[in-house]
């Protein structure tokens, strides 16, 4: 499996183990995340989830552009869009805490998905980037999610800047919650997942439902443009992976 699953102290730990250490989020990664997360709400022995690419491995270098090119050329890009939206909708429905522990790269799709988690921890070596607009990809979903999490001006700044940003800068924007050394990443992530998972379940779930309602509405507003702009852009001829 491209996503390894283990349970530690009632925390489901999902580790993305793509053969490339940068961890591109291809369809196999997304499908594995969907499969692993699908039973979280019903699992009585699971109080929280920790998602990571592992220490000294990328959390996500974004989508797999080679795969997207192949899908576009074979008129199968809708399959990728549907799977991505399945992951989004699943995350909106989960009522337990989800923590991200991120190292090296948090780019594109992985960055966007991380905004749906309840707590985000990055190492001081993690770089963040949203290279959508310079590469012809419509950025409405970034605007909607970042605005829901922080504010509109932050979303605009992220989309209009082309250079990667360091974790400290993203922390100042309130898009991640902690910055830690790499050797403390998994320990910190597990500790926070256990802390959040120990809160009264009904109270946390009710609060998270309100938060997710805003994010779900943001996703609905953005997805109308998503597929059209991906298919009509020059993405498949101009984008080179970070």
Image (cartoon, rainbow, N blue to C red):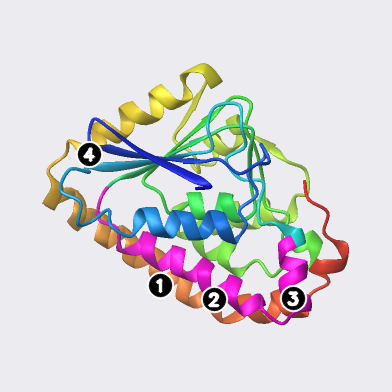
Circle number at residue 235:
none
Residue at the outermost front position: 1
In the figure, residue 225 lies in which quadrant? bottom right
Disc 4 and disc 2 in contact, CB within 8 angstroms:
no
Label 3 Cα crowd, 10 Å radius (few <14 / some 14-19 / many 20+): some
Q: What residue is rendered at 77% in x and 46% in y?
A: 242
Q: Which residue is mark 1?
A: 217
Q: Quadrant of residue 140?
A: bottom right
> Which quarter of the figure has residue 128?
top right
Residue 90 position, x and y percent, is 37, 64
Magenta region? 67-96
Residue 120 lies left or right of residue 112; in this view the side is left
**Neighbour tally class for label 1: few under 14, some 14-19, many 20 plus, Cα within 10 Å:** few
The residue labelled by disc 2 is 223
- Residue 95 among magenta residues: yes
- The residues tagged by marks 1 and 3 sit, at their Cα atoms, a distance apart of 28 Å
Q: Are marks 1 and 4 in contact (CB under 8 Å)?
A: no
Query: Which residue has dot 4 on it?
Result: 197
Q: Secondary structure at mark 4?
A: helix
Query: Given this view, does label 1 or label 3 mark the residue nearer the observer?
Result: 3
Residue at mark 3 to residue at mark 4: CA–CA distance: 41 Å
Residue identifier under label 3: 72
Q: CA distance from mark 1 to mark 4?
A: 26 Å
C-alpha gap between disc 2 and disc 1: 10 Å
């Amino acid at each position: 499996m491209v996503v390894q699953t283990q349970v530690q102290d009632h925390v489901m730990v999902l580790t993305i183990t793509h053969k490339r250490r940068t961890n591109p989020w291809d369809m196999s990664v997304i499908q594995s995340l969907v499969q692993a997360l699908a039973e979280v709400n019903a699992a009585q022995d699971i109080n929280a989830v920790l998602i990571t690419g592992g220490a000294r491995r990328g959390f996500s270098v974004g989508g797999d552009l080679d795969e997207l090119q192949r899908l576009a050329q074979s008129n199968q890009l809708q399959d990728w869009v549907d799977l991505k939206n399945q992951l989004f909708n699943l995350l909106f429905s989960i009522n337990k805490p989800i923590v991200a522990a991120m190292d090296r790269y948090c780019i594109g799709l992985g960055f966007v998905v991380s905004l749906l988690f309840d707590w985000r921890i990055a190492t001081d070596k993690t770089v963040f980037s949203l290279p959508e607009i310079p590469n012809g990809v419509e950025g409405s979903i970034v605007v909607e999610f970042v605005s829901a999490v922080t504010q509109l001006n932050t979303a605009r700044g992220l989309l209009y800047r082309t250079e990667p940003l360091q974790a400290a800068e993203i922390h100042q924007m309130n898009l991640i919650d902690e910055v830690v050394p790499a050797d403390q990443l998994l320990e910190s992530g597990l500790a926070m997942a256990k802390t959040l998972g120990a809160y009264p379940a009904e109270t946390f779930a009710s609060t998270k439902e309100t938060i997710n309602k805003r994010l779900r509405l943001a996703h609905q507003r953005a997805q109308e443009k998503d597929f059209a702009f991906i298919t009509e852009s020059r993405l498949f001829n101009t984008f080179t992976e970070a």
